[in-house]
Image (cartoon, helix red, strand yellow):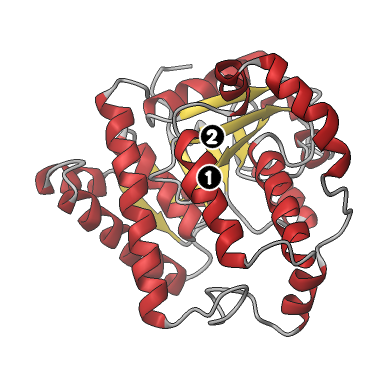
Amino acid sequence: MNAMEKISILGAGTMGHSIALSAAWGNQFVKVYGINQQDIENADKGLGKKLEVMVENELFTAKQAKEIRTRITFTTFLEEAVLEATFIVEVVPEVLDLKKELYNKLETLVEDDVVIASNTSGFKPSLLAADMKHPERFVVTHFWNPAHLIPLVEVVKGEHTHEKTVARAMTVLKKMNKKAVLLHKEIPGFIGNRLQYALFREAQALLDAGAASKEDIDAAVTYSIGRRLPITGPLMSADMGGLDVFSAISNYLFEELSTDQQSGKILTQLVEENKLGDKTGQGFYLWEPEVSAMLNEEREQTLIHFLKNDLKGGNL
């Protein structure tokens, strides 16, 4: 297989066109499949806005942005999208039957050695590939949102995934300047979501128990461990703090931590009331349009700051 893969992204939503941007930024040509013309127009508009912000923040020049844009082609025809493709990334909704149906169709359209990767955030690859004729070419590549700014991609191999498939995925991701981490076992939620939801479960438990306000619970993260985690993850932080100390605290604190198996009381009530957060205007917090715009921009600028440091420091 040639070093330069011919990439197709199946799904033109936020994740799809953001992954395409990452690939094109890495000098790779990409075809993006959208379900209809409106889907394509929305993706093209989103892509243009992202490129504009990245130019403004000097991640690349306006000339380079134009070159990046020329490497991305949109289409509403699946057959055209995968024509001559050697590496396909599926970015469709998290519906098992929908994904399996797509894989079955793809196997009638592409050669046996074409890699089929899924951006699933939680399905085990062996489950997704269960009905495939060639499960050895299937692998999970879980990008994090926003995919063009967050370096992490979790690579998960299934029971039948060939090592060559994994190697090709790692090579593609390296060309995208991604930080790929490889899971040696299939576990629900992979690494990132398991860690994220462990923290979220404890935050819910603290709020439900009335231990502190939502503002102070969030502040306890953003103004403490949130400041350290960009540099040292939980295991390295433990090393730096002293494993004897962390072991002693684990021994008495773990039995006090939440073991809830379902969403917390307050979260469940908010969902039942259709208070879903930013997208509905209210969740744990009240999301006025100007507040939403401000916080989304602030988060974007923070991610760009870290990405610049990663690129400058040669971490990617």
**Residue at x 45%, y 34% (from the top left corner):** 230
Mark 2 in CB contact with mark 1 (< 8 angstroms)? yes
- Give x and y (percent) for residue 308: 27, 36
- For this rendering, which residue is in front, 83 or 301? 301
SS under mark 2: strand
Query: Picture quarter containing residue 236?
Result: top right
- Above/below status of 263 relative to 192: below
- Give x and y (percent) for residue 291: 39, 75
Inter-mark Cα distance, 2 to 1: 7 Å
Is 170 on the left or on the right of 259, as rendered?
A: left
Query: Picture quarter containing residue 294?
Result: bottom left
Res 162 seen here? no
Q: What amino acid type should be assigned to the residue bearing mark 1? A: Trp
- For this rendering, which residue is in front, 188 or 83? 188
Please give the residue where the numbered disc 1 appears in the rendered image.
144
**Residue at x 48%, y 52% (from the top left corner):** 16
- Above/below status of 270 relative to 233: below
Please give the residue where the numbered disc 2 appears in the rendered image.
153
Q: What amino acid type should be assigned to the residue bearing mark 2? A: Val
**Residue at x 72%, y 64% (from the top left corner):** 207
- For this rendering, which residue is in front, 104 or 291? 291
Is 201 on the left or on the right of 68, as rendered?
A: right
Res 239 seen here? yes
Is 117 on the left or on the right of 67, as rendered?
A: right
Quadrant of the image containing the C terminus = top left
Q: Residues within 10 Å of mark 1 (few under 14, many from 20)?
A: some
SS under mark 1: loop
- Give x and y (percent) for residue 256: 85, 44
- For this rendering, which residue is in front, 163 or 267? 267
Is 59 on the left or on the right of 61, as rendered?
A: right
- Give x and y (percent) for residue 137: 67, 27
- Label 2 vs 1, first from the N-terminus: 1
